[in-house]
Amino acid sequence: MISAAAVLVSAAVCGVGLIWLTVPSVSWGTGRKALVLILCGLIQAELARRTAHADTPGVSAAAVWVVGAALTLPLAGVMVVSAVLLTHDQFRGPRRGSHLGRVLTGTAGAALAWLVYSAAGGMLGAVLAGLAHLAATNGPTLVREARRLLRDAHHRGSIGDGMTCAALGVLLGSFAQHSLLAVPLVLLPAAYLQRAARGRALRHAAAHDPKTQLWNHAAWQTLSSAALASHRTHTAVLMVDLDHFKRLNDTYGHQAGDDVLTCVAHVLQTTTRRNDIVARFGGEEFSILLPGVTEQQACQAAERIRDQIAALTVITTNLHGRPTTIKGITASIGVATTHQGEACVDDLLVHADRWLYEAKESGRNRVCGPVLAAA
């Protein structure tokens, strides 16, 4: 097993050597800056690696040092610092084993940041350089996280991690221009950023269903109880159960079943409101809390969900690994509502489950609830 010290020394020497080979006229000051940036980035990454849990996803803080390099080094130095740190991330970082395209994308983002800063200059240019690097390396991820944040008021994603790394890099580059002693001071906030990201990852894994990324039942109970306490009147719970799901699994395979669950979860997230709480109850069942709705509104919402599920077309693979398309997915939905502030979530679940059983017994692919029964 190669020691961390050997990795640090080898990577740092290779990095500085690459700078001198790339630009023979490089100054000693530039070489020292590159060496300090590479060493600090490698030390921080190795320390984070030693304290990380094997099954906990982390966040790479290489962007801190890469953006800092873009504000303090010539282009050749920026490319070398970026390549060394991102290659180290590829083999020993939190995303080790990921595609080599991350290294190329990160290096291209570093070059773009350098070009932006060279063109604009000053603090505004530094901020724009950080944003350029962020957009080049994490743009699609940030867009997805922003969409999830808009859809789900309770979602806590990693949208801030990339921004924090870019901001730390801007501060690092601004201070490093005046003194190299400022560079090691960034080690502490960078390490804290990674520890905080791991904590968020653990909390997310504990509260979400791994297949659908919806809330799990325990988290849903906690959130729903709090929401019910704050909405003293007009609250509803929907129990959604996919019809004949076992038959679907037996026909197409469990991978296809998982793809169907994922598509249904997406329907539930996009069809409900931002403050509604959606969870995978278990198996092919889902539970939804609708705060502040009347019985009529709850039944209308359930009908919209049922229609959207029935319109689904899921592209997946069958038992033999061949592409296949699944249509005709239906769901039965039970609706329970309350006007009493003292009602609890468990009571609503019992009533919603009873109406769900009624929907199943009545022929499936329908909504059953007190308002519909009265009608």
Image (cartoon, rainbow, N blue to C red):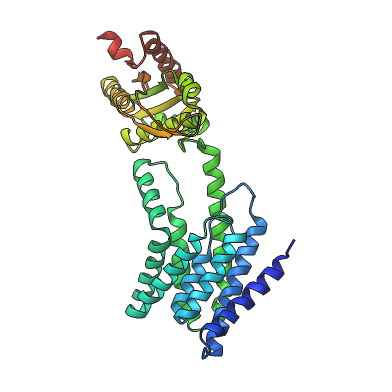
Q: Is residue 325 left or right of residue 22?
A: left
For the point 36% across and 21% down, the residue is: 330
Q: Is residue 113 above or below residue 259?
A: below
Residue at the image point whose x is 32% and y is 78% from the top:
120
Q: Is 229 on the left-hand or right-hand side of 19? A: left
Q: Is residue 87 above or below residue 241?
A: below
59 or 343, which lies in front? 59
Q: Nearer the viewer, residue 76 or 205?
A: 76
Nearer to me, 249 or 143: 249
Residue 309 position, x and y percent, is 34, 27
Q: Quadrant of the N terminus?
A: bottom right
- Which quadrant of the structure image shows residue 268? top left
Residue at 38% across, 23% down: 238
Residue 238 visible to an observer of this rendering: yes
Which quadrant is the C terminus positioned in? top left
Q: Is residue 285 above or below residue 109?
A: above
Residue 210 position in % (x across, y down)? 52, 37
Which of the 4 quarters of the picture holds residue 162? bottom left
Rendered location of residue 32, percent (x, y)? 57, 84
Residue at 56% x, 65% y is 87
Q: Residue 360, image x and y in percent?
A: 40, 12
